[in-house]
Image (tube, helix red, strand yellow):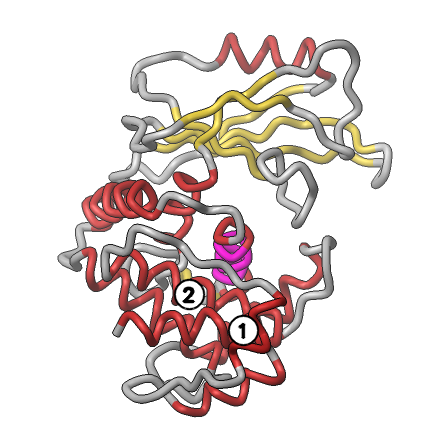
């Protein structure tokens, strides 16, 4: 939201990284509650068997909209920072009323967040899985896909994206004690992207869960109407940026409306499905990224 200068989707989570594994956050959280209108905070109990050193806090406040107690969820990850570029950005948003000079927060830039986010859209390897216990996680998976597509529109440093992606893949595989490779994670991203682009006719991902997620996420995205066709555009961008990493490209191409006339002579050929050519008329933006993906094969 801060990097884009506009609100795109809702989230009640705040994620921070604290490299110091021994620091006590209680005094900081108490001060936040005192100074910023929270009534109290509570730490959620962690699974003692988790390899990831992560803490979850709920900061409670009285909601004037719901007229009852609500909370903001703070996720604290205690590990080294794997981002290459971190920037200071003002907390300025139509959702937050501020006085005086805007406070600033340190965040990874767009390329670095994209490298991180890509690892989350890989359900069979490093990403949010299709299911956690009995619960289907389609909506959470599609949230990541939507964020990836939004970031792709402004990304401009594929080398740094790849470096951050590789670093986070290695960390996630270590946490999960999985033997996959970076190449496996890239294929996982592409498989799920193509499953959406081919409307469940690719056969390498769980389209049933992904499709439900596309429907469920609608209420969390308010910057635009979100439906399967938009999800196909997002998936095409994810497949493209994953391929940029896979084939070590040093440039990111972007769709522009004036390219539509030139695209009339473009055709996607095997080994990709030629059915994707149907998107040339119905969804030229998605077709552009899929054609550019085919060019790399």
Instruction: Where is residue 127? Give x, y as percent.
Output: 36, 56
Residue that label 1 marks: 232
The answer to if 147 sits in the magenta stretch is yes
Instruction: Where is residue 272? Give x, y as percent.
Output: 33, 84
Which residue is depicted at the point 43% across and 74% down?
Answer: 290
Position of residue 240 in the picture relative to residue 284 (left or right): left
Q: Who comes first in sequence, dot 1 or dot 2?
A: 2
Position of residue 289 in the picture relative to residue 11 (left or right): left
Which residue is depicted at the point 28% across and 26% down?
Answer: 80
Question: Does the magenta stretch mainly form a helix, a strand or a loop?
Answer: helix
Position of residue 65 in the picture relative to residue 186 (left or right): right
Q: Relative to 146, say whether 32 is above or below.
A: above
Q: Secondary structure at mark 1?
A: helix
Residue 43's disc is none
Instruction: Where is residue 161? Give x, y as percent.
Output: 34, 45
Which residue is depicted at the point 42% across and 65% down?
Answer: 131
Q: Quadrant of residue 174?
A: top left
Estimate the spatial distance between the alpha carbons at disc 1 and disc 2, rounded to whole Å.
22 Å
Residue that label 2 marks: 131
Of circles 1 and 2, which is in front? 1
Give whichever of 61, 271 is nearer the camera: 271
Give whichever of 49, 109 is nearer the camera: 109
Around disc 1, counting alpha carbons within 10 Å, would you say few (fewer than 14), some (14 to 19), or many (20 or more)?
Answer: many
The answer to if 87 sits in the magenta stretch is no
Q: Quadrant of residue 111?
A: top left
Instruction: Where is residue 35? Give x, y as percent.
Output: 69, 9
> What is the magenta range?
140-149
Around disc 2, counting alpha carbons within 10 Å, would you say few (fewer than 14), some (14 to 19), or many (20 or more)?
Answer: few
Q: Relative to 164, say whether 205 is above or below.
A: below
Q: Quadrant of the C terminus?
A: bottom left
- Do we see residue 134 in this rendering? yes
Q: Relative to 240, say whether 106 is above or below.
A: above
């Amino acid at each position: 939201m801060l990097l884009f200068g506009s609100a795109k989707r809702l989230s009640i989570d705040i994620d921070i990284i604290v490299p110091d594994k021994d620091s006590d956050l209680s005094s900081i959280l108490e001060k936040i509650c005192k100074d910023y209108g929270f009534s109290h905070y509570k730490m959620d109990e962690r699974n003692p068997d988790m390899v990831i050193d992560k803490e979850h806090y709920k900061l409670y406040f009285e909601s004037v909209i719901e007229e009852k107690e609500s909370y903001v969820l703070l996720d604290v990850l205690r590990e080294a920072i794997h981002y290459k570029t971190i920037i200071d950005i003002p907390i300025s948003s139509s959702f937050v009323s501020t006085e005086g000079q805007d406070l600033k927060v340190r965040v990874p830039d767009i390329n670095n967040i994209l490298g991180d986010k890509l690892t989350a859209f890989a359900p069979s390897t490093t990403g949010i899985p299709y299911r956690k216990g009995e619960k289907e996680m389609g909506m959470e998976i599609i949230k990541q896909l939507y964020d990836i597509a939004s970031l792709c529109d402004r990304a401009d440093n594929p080398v740094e994206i790849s470096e951050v992606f590789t670093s986070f893949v290695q960390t996630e595989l270590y946490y999960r004690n999985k033997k996959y490779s970076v190449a496996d994670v890239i294929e996982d991203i592409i498989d799920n992207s193509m499953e959406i682009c081919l409307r469940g006719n690719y056969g390498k991902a769980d389209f049933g869960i992904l499709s439900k997620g596309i429907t469920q996420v609608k209420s969390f995205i308010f910057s635009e109407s979100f439906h399967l066709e938009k999800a196909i555009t997002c998936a095409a961008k994810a497949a493209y940026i994953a391929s940029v990493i896979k084939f070590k490209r040093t440039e990111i191409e972007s769709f522009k409306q004036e390219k539509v006339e030139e695209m009339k002579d473009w055709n996607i050929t095997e080994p990709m499905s030629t059915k994707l050519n149907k998107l040339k008329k119905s969804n030229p933006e998605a077709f552009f990224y899929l054609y550019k993906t085919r060019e790399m094969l």
